[in-house]
């Protein structure tokens, strides 16, 4: 048996409970990790609150968590990892626990913090998937709505590294940081269309909406074609003829591996993960019991919110072995 966070009814963060659960055993191709960081994604909140109940009813009790990073301690038949490897990946059956199963683990670069490693999975795959679906190419201009958020941050850097001109709508406090990541940052809110046109007089070829801020109609007008706009956050997409991109179920998806391997040329300057400890005001973290235990080298539970990080941090060697606890630089939420 081991410890995990669970919920047995939909509701506010207070439904989360510290529970004894059966320690999972890896199946073929899977590994079990001792979790060093588990990410908190918006989808976790939607599942726990019941917003996804019609589309994907929960089978209680649920261990939340989509992503994790940790040290392999058990290996299923045919898995591409060994005990002691430091890995990250999408969790099977939840990640808010002492142990988690990963289907397709990716080796964690030594210099990558545990928080950023865990947070990279969903946001990295989402950004890669949408850029692929948009068919954004070198020399084109991409508009990213929500460029200061977790998915937007990755999309900006991936696109800029591919020679795509990026314009990003952001809050005032994110303008300098997103500019440093390779985009022309413009303030969102009233007048954003005029500001984007001024920033991209050559026109906008494709739009990636990661904000869900009611920008689809104007985005279609900017590109002149609804097929050039994709959203991951606006449920009114169909009303505008816009594609809503949801997570890929393709088991052959290599985007995370490619993301970790491919970005040594990025010049983005600042790498910042964000720690979400018990007692955090983050709406999802606020329900994590403060008594959640850790053993071994872990001195504190690491609940990582989606990061704002530099792709340069991903340029280190891939294979790693278990190591002692590391100090991790974090940024305010």
Image (cartoon, grey):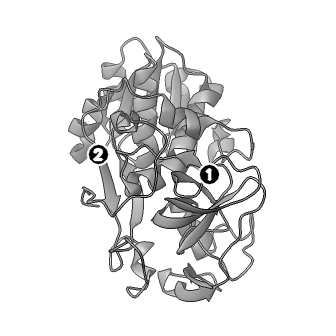
Residue found at x 43% / y 83%: 293
Secondary element under disc 1, as helix, strand or loop, is loop
Kindly identify which residue carries mark 1: 235
CB atoms of marks 1 and 2 within 8 Å: no
Q: Quadrant of residue 3?
A: bottom right
Residue found at x 59% / y 71%: 64
Q: Is residue 71 left or right of residue 226?
A: left
Instruction: From this view, report whether residue 328 is shown above or below residue 302.
Output: above
Looking at the image, is mark 1 or mark 2 earlier in the sequence? 2
Kindly identify which residue carries mark 2: 171
Q: Residues within 10 Å of mark 1 (few under 14, many from 20)?
A: few
- In front: 199, or 258? 258
Q: Quadrant of residue 296?
A: bottom left
Locate residue 280, reporting x and y percent.
Answer: 32, 75
- In front: 280, or 103? 103
Instruction: From this view, report whether residue 123 is shown above or below residue 2.
Output: above
Locate residue 100, reporting x and y percent.
Answer: 60, 67
Locate residue 273, reporting x and y percent.
Answer: 33, 53
Q: Residues within 10 Å of mark 2 (few under 14, many from 20)?
A: some
Q: Quadrant of the C terminus?
A: bottom left
Q: Is residue 153 visible?
A: yes
- In front: 117, or 245? 117
Instruction: From this view, report whether residue 273 is shown above or below residue 177.
Output: below
- In front: 218, or 108? 108
Q: Is residue 50 left or right of residue 138?
A: right
Q: Is residue 230 visible?
A: no
Q: Is residue 204 left or right of residue 33?
A: left
| Label 1 to label 2: alpha-carbon separation | 22 Å
């Amino acid at each position: 048996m081991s410890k995990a966070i669970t919920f047995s009814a939909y509701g506010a963060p207070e439904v989360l409970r510290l529970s004894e659960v059966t320690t999972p055993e890896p199946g073929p191709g899977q590994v079990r990790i001792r979790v060093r960081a588990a990410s908190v994604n918006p989808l976790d909140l939607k599942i726990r609150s019941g917003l996804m109940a019609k589309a994907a009813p929960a089978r209680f009790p649920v261990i939340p968590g989509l992503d994790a990073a940790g040290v392999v301690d058990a290996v299923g038949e045919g898995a591409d990892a060994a005990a002691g490897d430091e890995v990250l990946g999408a969790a099977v059956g939840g990640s808010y626990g002492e142990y988690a199963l990963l289907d397709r683990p990716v080796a964690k670069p030594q210099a990558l913090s545990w928080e950023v490693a865990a947070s990279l999975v969903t946001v990295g795959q989402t950004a890669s998937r949408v850029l692929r679906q948009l068919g954004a190419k070198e020399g084109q201009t991409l508009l990213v709505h929500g460029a200061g958020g977790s998915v937007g941050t990755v999309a900006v850097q991936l696109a800029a590294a591919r020679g795509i001109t990026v314009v990003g709508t952001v809050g005032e406090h994110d303008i300098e940081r997103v500019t440093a990541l390779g985009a022309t940052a413009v303030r969102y809110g009233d007048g954003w269309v005029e500001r984007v046109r001024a920033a991209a007089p050559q026109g906008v070829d494709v739009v990636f909406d990661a904000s869900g801020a009611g920008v689809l109609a104007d985005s279609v007008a900017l590109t002149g074609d609804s097929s050039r706009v994709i959203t991951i956050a606006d449920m009114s997409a169909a009303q505008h003829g816009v594609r809503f991109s949801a997570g890929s179920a393709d088991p052959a998806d290599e985007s995370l591996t490619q993301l970790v391997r491919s970005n040594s040329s990025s010049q983005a300057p600042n790498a910042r993960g964000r720690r979400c400890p018990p007692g955090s005001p983050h709406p999802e973290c606020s329900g994590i019991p403060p008594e959640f235990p850790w053993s071994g080298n872990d001195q504190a539970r690491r609940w990582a919110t989606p990061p704002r990080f530099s792709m340069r941090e991903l340029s280190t060697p891939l294979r790693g072995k278990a190591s002692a606890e590391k100090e991790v630089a974090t940024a305010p939420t």
